[in-house]
Image: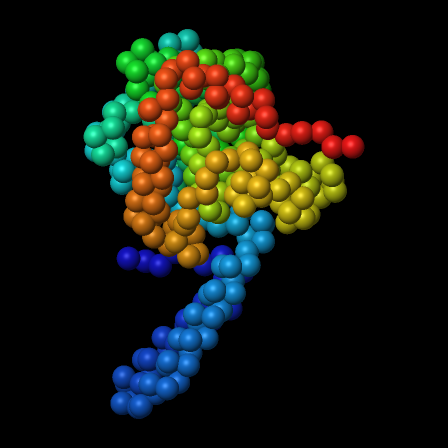
Amino acid sequence: MKPPTSLPFEKPLIELEELLSNLQDKSEEQNLDLVQEVERLKKKISQTRGQIYKNLTPWQRVLIVRHKDRPYLLDYLRMITSDFVELHGDRIHGDDKALIGGFATIDGEKVMVIGQQKGRDTKENILRNFGCAHPEGYRKALRLMKLATHFNLPIITFIDTPGAFPGVPSEERHVAEAIAVNIREMFSLTVPVIAIVIGEGGSGGALGIGVADRILILENAYYSVISPEGCASILWKDRAYAPQAAEALKMIAKDLLELKLVDEIIPEPEGGAHRDPSETAQTLKTALLRNLKELKEIPAKKLVESRFEKYRHIGHFTE
C-alpha cells in the first residue's frame, strides 16, 4: 500500500526514514555490517516521531485533519457497519450529496447514521460540494432523525465539514433557517443521539447535526465557530495568520474537553487517522457502542431533559 503523503512539519521524520532506507539498501547491496548504525538511526527516528506528534500545535492538527487520505464518513461506515442503506431527498427540493444518511447496523445495534461526506478527487468533491451542505441537506437530516424516532432507533451523526454552503442558492433556500430548525428539533428527539466529530467541525454546518446527548471527537479533529483562515481574515485581514487563529480559537480536542464542549476524545494512531484507518475505525466503534449502551438505559423523558440541561450549562460569564 502506498504510504500517506507527508505534511510539512513531518519533513525531519521523512528525511530520517529515507536515510534509514538508503542505509539498509547499502547494507544489502554491499554486504556490509551496519547493524549498529541502523539501530542508532531507528532509535533517532522513534525519538523524532515522539517529539513531533506529542507536541503538535493546533494548526498542525488542522493540517492532519485535512489530509487527503484521512478517512471520511463512507470509509467509516464500510468498516464499522454491516448493512448501511442510504436514504435520499428532503421531500421539498432535492437530494444533497454533501450530507448523507440512512439505516445501518453496528455490531447488532440498529441505528440511523447521518453525516457530511467529502470527496477524494475534483470530480467527487464537486459532487459532494466539498462536504458543505445546502439547506436541503439539513432538511434531509431532520427527516431522517424524525424517521429514526418513529422506529425508536438511536441517531449517530458524523461531523466533517468546513461549514454549510454559503452561496447564493443556499441563501435563497434559507440555509440559516434550516440549521436553526434542526438545532431546535434535535432537543426534543426522544431517542439517544451521539455526535462524533471525525474531521472538521465548522460553525453552523456542524451544529446543524451536532445537538447530541454525547459529543465525541477524534484526537486531531477540531470543532469551532469559524475556520482558522476565516478568523484570520477577520481579525488580521490576512489568511496567513491562520496558525495564530487556530491557537486563539481553542478549537482542538484537548481544549474542547477542558471547556466541556465535548464529552470524550477518541485516540488516533500516531500521525493521524490516515496512518491506520482500520485501527481508528475500531477505536471509534468501541467508544460509540459504549456510549450508546449507557444512553439506551436512560428513559426518553430523562434523556430529553438531560440534553437540554447539558447545553444550558455550556459557557459562563466572567467579570
Identify the image quadrant of the N terminus: bottom left
Q: Is residue 41 above or below residue 130?
A: below
> What residue occupies the far right of the structure in this picture?
319
Left or right? Give the position of 83 relative to 309: left
Residue 140 seen in the current view: no
Q: How many numbered marks appear?
A: 0
Residue at horizontal 30 percent and vertical 19 percent from the top: 153
Between residues 120 and 180, which one lies in front from this camera angle?
180
- Left or right: residue 241 versus residue 184 is right
Residue at the image point whose x is 64% and y is 40% from the top: 249
Q: 238 or 40: which is nearer to us?
A: 40
Image quadrant of residue 141? top left
Task: Please state the horizontal and vertical placement of residue 246, each as a whole percent of the image.
Answer: 62, 45
Q: Is residue 176 visible?
A: yes
- Viewed as shown, does residue 139 lie left or right of 312? left
Residue 295 x/y as whole percent: 37, 26
Residue 58 in the figure: left or right of residue 78: right
